[in-house]
Amino acid sequence: MSSIEKINFWEIFQIQNLISLSRILMTPIIGYFLWVNNNNATLILVFLLILAGSTDYLDGYLARKLNRQTALGLMLDPLADKIFATILILELVFLRKFPLWLALIIFFRDLIILIGATKMIRKKDFIPSSINSGKYYFAALAMLIASHVIGFAFGQYFCLYLTVVLYIISSFEYARNFYLVIKGEKPLEPSEDPVYKFIRGTLTVIFSAIFLYKLFEQFFGLNIF
């Protein structure tokens, strides 16, 4: 959890915050190429998704490098992620048959987290930070979204189950931390246990390898086994 300072909305013009906002501004462009739906549009969509992912890393990197980690930036970065994902999911529901039931529970979760975080900020004077399971959930959701964008059939099914599992785990952990904070207790911090980190890293590598292998198999005819 991060201690909150007075929010200065003029900081929106700092480079790292403008980069965060750029993800939101990409959504209508992505929506247009989803509607066009041809091979050239798909290539542009892949580029735009990579660019969006790069900005998610770059804004945090610049904030640390330039020593500009502010209250506004701490809120804007995850908020931009959620707005970007929300708009993109809406576009995919209409243009790529993204599961409506999943879209609804994702929107419900984000709304509850936003309300809870706002309450925590107002009453407890700090900004709640992300938890590990929440970060992995968003990564799985990003891969699910990308799979629908490019028409990757295996990724749509594989990442659907992965997203649902991480959705349940992260929702439980957010609810637990919210409950602890409201009671005036310290929220549980992410585990730094080396064994836990090793298991987490190993599973990430395995799932990523499966995803990439199937991706190359579908689009480039790769078949090693």
Image (spheres, helix red, strand yellow):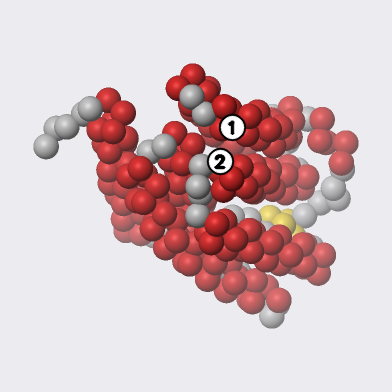
Taking depth in this image into account, of 123 and 194 the one nearest to the observer is: 123
Q: Position of residue 59 (x, y in %)?
A: 64, 33
What mark, if any, has residue 119 been given in the picture? none
Q: Position of residue 84 (x, y in %)?
A: 64, 42
Taking depth in this image into account, of 64 and 88 the one nearest to the observer is: 88
Q: Position of residue 136 (x, y in %)?
A: 46, 52
Do the residues under discs 2 and 1 have CB atoms within 8 angstroms?
yes
Which residue does the numbered mark 2 point to in the structure image?
Answer: 95
User: Above or below — where is 69 with respect to 19?
Assistant: below
User: What element does badge 1 sit on?
Assistant: helix
Q: Position of residue 153 (x, y in %)?
A: 35, 43
Left/right of residue 118 with respect to residue 50 in the rendered view: right
The quadrant in which the C terminus is found is top left
Which residue does the numbered mark 1 point to in the structure image?
Answer: 35
Q: CA distance from mark 2 to mark 1?
A: 7 Å
Q: Earlier in the sequence, mark 2 or mark 1?
A: 1
Residue at the spot x=36%, y=51% of the render? Answer: 157
Left/right of residue 159 with respect to residue 35 in the rendered view: left
How crowded is the residue under tag 1: few (<14 C-alpha within 10 Å), some, or many (20+)? Answer: some
Question: Quick check: can you spot residue 189?
Answer: no
Given the image, on which type of amino acid does mark 2 rest?
Leu
Given the image, on which type of amino acid does mark 1 rest?
Trp
